[in-house]
Amino acid sequence: MDVKAAVAFEAGKPLSIETVQLEGPKEGEVLVEIKATGVCHTDAFTLSGADPEGLFPAILGHEGAGVVVEVGAGVKSVKVGDHVIPLYIPECRNCEYCLSGKTNLCQAIRVTQGRGVMPDGTSRFSLNGQKLLHYMGTSTFANYTVLPEISVAKIREDAPFEKVCLIGCGVTTGLGAVVNTAKVEAGSNVVVFGLGGVGLNVIQGAKMVGANMIVGVDINPAKRELAEKFGMTHFVNPKEVAGDLVAYLVELTKGGADYSFECIGNINVMRQALECCHKGWGTSVIIGVAGAGQEISTRPFQLVTGRVWKGSAFGGAKGRTDVPKIVDWFMNGKIDIDSLITQVMQIEKVNEAFDLMHGESIRSVLTF
Ligand code: APR
Ligand code: ZN
């Protein structure tokens, strides 16, 4: 079938809207009509060419929502008409990782997904006979896409696509880091570095679980107002702190953060996030993605004296199990997604959405 897609032909070039060909779903796969998709920094990172695993030509996008319109042979967990959110981390419930109960990093299709193809080793997308690669197993910058059945979470049908699409990445990444990775307890003091889409979701997660102080740290004072709306109790602009930021934060939290979160991708900030944690128990979670080849550092004494350094991908969430619950949280008014959406535009304006990411925008949502 013909589908409308934004194609990334090569690194560093704008996306191009094309009519591309999509083959139907093979065994264990589903065809999904994408109704809305967010634009995330990871898409921009790959498009920039800085992502060593980025492959071209490809159809980017990994923060979508849509409807199943066809299922391949043997598909049991979803049916035609089901509303779904594509998952860039699948949940097969069978592999060693899924069965461990200790991680969300399902490995069932890791190798083929990383090569930009479906589990049988081939791509479903092409343009005039030239193969186009899938991206993160999702390729949501197309009005139809094919995914393995283990890579979709079935969600309730009354949830609006142009809102809940953000649960496919940013919302879950932030909330999940609080709930699944750090397991923040009520009454905790929390420090959040970076108040973009991810940091705001850490803040609303911390508020949801009943944190005490929720300190937001950002070099852009314009981020303050929205962060306060999400539950931030104290704002710190590192540029306005005379002296050492870590010492300032330890003082502010009366001994250090019980939990800190790095939502920027800056290795120097990652160190500050660890070191502002409370001696004896403070846990720091790295969420931001640092540039290829970069390394973190601290004195081992920081860990010997009880601080814990962790990381989290997709908020430690198991997609098929946890994503429908987060959709319920949104539908029940427990979390705010509307305020994260700064623009809604047609897929044709996808390059404008990428440009907006460098400015004041939190999230742009594209519709088809
Ligand atoms: N100290 C404090 N704040 C900073 C610093 C710094 N040194 N550098 C940048 N910031 C702030 C920016 O002002 C911005 O508000 O961090 C925020 C980052 O927000 P976004 O750019 O909107 O990024 P976001 O979508 O939240 O993603 C953050 O998570 O998923 C990853 O790849 C993503 O690494 C990125 C991170
Ligand atoms: Zn993302």
Image (cartoon, rainbow, N blue to C red):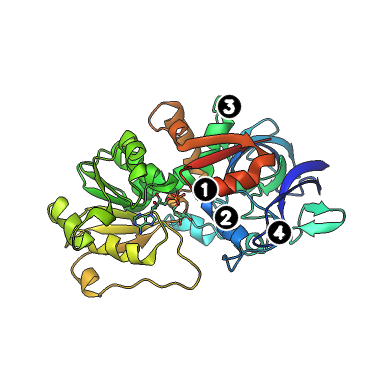
Residue 49 shown left or right of residue 32 in the figure: left
Q: CA distance from mark 1 to mark 3?
A: 30 Å
Q: Position of residue 270 (x, y in %)?
A: 34, 63
Q: Between 154 and 189, which is closer to the camera in this rendering?
A: 189
Q: Between 184 and 37, which is closer to the camera in this rendering?
A: 37
- Around disc 2, counting alpha carbons within 10 Å, would you say few (fewer than 14), some (14 to 19), or many (20 or more)? some
Could you tell me which residue is drawn at 77 percent across and 52 percent down?
A: 124
Residue 3 shown left or right of residue 352 in the figure: right
Q: Position of residue 318 (x, y in %)?
A: 48, 48
Q: Which residue is mark 3?
A: 157
- Around disc 3, counting alpha carbons within 10 Å, would you say few (fewer than 14), some (14 to 19), or many (20 or more)? few
Q: Which residue is mark 2?
A: 44
Label located before the other in sequence (1 or 4): 4
Q: CA distance from mark 2 to mark 3?
A: 30 Å
Q: Quadrant of the N terminus?
A: top right
* Contact between labelled residues 4 and 2, with CB atoms less than 8 Å apart: no
Q: Which residue is mark 1?
A: 357
Q: Position of residue 22 (x, y in %)?
A: 79, 47
Helix, strand or loop under label 1: loop
Q: Which residue is mark 4?
A: 117
Q: CA distance from mark 2 to mark 4?
A: 20 Å
Where is residue 74, by image quadrant?
A: top right
Could you tell me which residue is drawn at 62 percent across and 49 percent down?
A: 61
Where is residue 239, by image quadrant?
A: bottom left
Q: Position of residue 221 (x, y in %)?
A: 33, 46
Where is residue 110, by image quadrant?
A: bottom right
Foreground mark, 2 or 3, reads 2
Label located before the other in sequence (4 or 3): 4
Could you tell me which residue is drawn at 58 percent across and 27 percent down?
A: 157
Residue 339 shown left or right of residue 131 in the figure: left
Label located before the other in sequence (2 or 3): 2
Label located before the other in sequence (1 or 3): 3
